[in-house]
Amino acid sequence: MKEADVIVGGLGAVGAGILRSLDRRGARVIGIDRYRPPHEMGSSHGQTRITREFVGEGPEYVPLVRRSHEIWAELERGGARLRERTGLVYLARRGGIAQRHHTNDFIAATCEVARAAGVAMPELDARALREAWPQFVVPDDTVGYLEPEAGFVRPERCIEAQLAALRDPAASLVFGETILEVREAAGGVEVRTDQGLYRAGKVILATGPWTPDLVGGAFGRDLRVLRQTQYWFRLTDASLWRGAPTFLWFHGDGPADVFYGFPPDSGATAIKVASEQYEAACDPDRCDRQVSAEEAAAMFETHVRGRLNGVAPVLEQAMACLYTFNGTPGREGRFMIGPHPTVAGVTVVSACSGHGFKHAAGLGDALAAQVLGETPFCDLSAFAVAS
């Protein structure tokens, strides 16, 4: 039996951040993942993820993304290129309702968080948007707002950099084992996988879409696993997209009337775009990982055509990923962090719901401090499990 001070189950965005932060504090750690991270079976892949400081989901998230940015900068000093400050432009219809992540007016909430931070995000009319960003086909009733320091991070590289920063990765990382059970044991907690047994004083489970079945309780009741799709469409004018911002475009009043995208990275010949769906749940072990031609065509016709210049309906790549969404009434879309419902010494974190990656490194740092009995740099009580 291998032993540690803390075992971390799941080494995606959050788990990798927790493990690194524990290791930096001198704790003996073991991290367990059923695959070899970074991988494409969970939520932490797809080459790019938006990062933004003015978080419309709520001001309680802001300290987490700021700490994440500090951690990315620390890791980049080792040579990794993790974060790009492309700017993020928010586009919407004047007078429209920008619904996203269960916030009724996401843009207004974003601007309010910026104002609270002492930063103005002035409104740009259609003419100003066209002049600044000719990549966008902007109707006359469009308004925009720019968050200049926002942009994207590279999820696979972020996970690789955090795991590579461990003092002894070979001794700390266990890949290819599935956690079957956590149970109380003398002096701590035992973790049983399909290949072995491990023991630690504390355990943190950051197992993403496998959390509902593994943990149960409120996590099994309120978390839903949602299949999402990402697309890369071919550029017909790559030069047009040089220097383009990351964007989030609300072109209607419904929660489905929004998509987002990224400028091509490192000389790529395609642009990545995606939307979100919150209706159809899936089983992570039986989810369809293939993206059909019909899905790609629908994405282009519903969101891209007539809005992005220099982009053809030619799909170069597509992939599915999973959101683990908190559906607790009144707390939809929030992170969900709390003790295991039946096993003492186990903390469970589900920090996804579609907006988790930008916070993950900071959240990992806060949770590492909390588990080791330190005072975290920010208050995590806003994400406590509802009774």
Image (cartoon, helix red, strand yellow):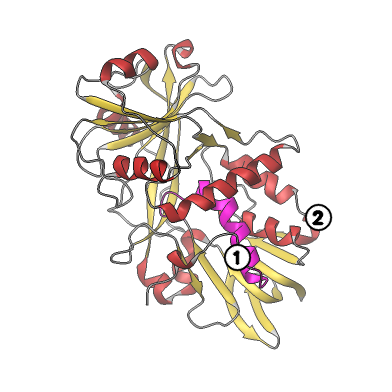
Q: Main secondary structure of the magenta part?
A: helix
Q: Position of residue 177 (x, y in %)?
A: 64, 63
Question: Regarding mark 1 in the picture, which secondary structure is present there?
Answer: loop
Determine whether 24 is above or below 371 in the image.
above
Taking depth in this image into account, of 41 and 167 the one nearest to the observer is 167
Badge 2 vs badge 1, beta-carbon distance below 8 Å? no
Query: Is residue 260 shown left or right of residue 29?
Result: left
Q: Residue at x 28, y 33 (%)?
A: 298
Q: How busy is the neighbourhood of tag 1: few (under 14 within 10 Å), some, or many (20 plus)? A: some
| Residue 328 among magenta residues | no
Determine whether 184 is above or below 324 in the image.
below
Q: Residue at x 76, y 76 (%)?
A: 1
Q: Position of residue 116 (x, y in %)?
A: 41, 46
Q: Position of residue 71 (x, y in %)?
A: 65, 46
Mark 2 vs mark 1: in front: 2
The residue that mark 1 highlights is: 178
Query: Is residue 60 shown left or right of residue 127?
Result: right
**Label 2 sits on what residue type?**
Arg
First to last magenta residue range? 352-374
Q: Residue at x 55, y 62 (%)?
A: 206
Query: Is residue 6 shown left or right of residue 207?
Result: right
Query: Is residue 137 shown left or right of residue 273?
Result: left
The residue that mark 2 highlights is: 167
Q: Quick check: can you spot residue 42?
A: no
| Residue 364 among magenta residues | yes
Q: Quick check: can you spot residue 386?
A: yes
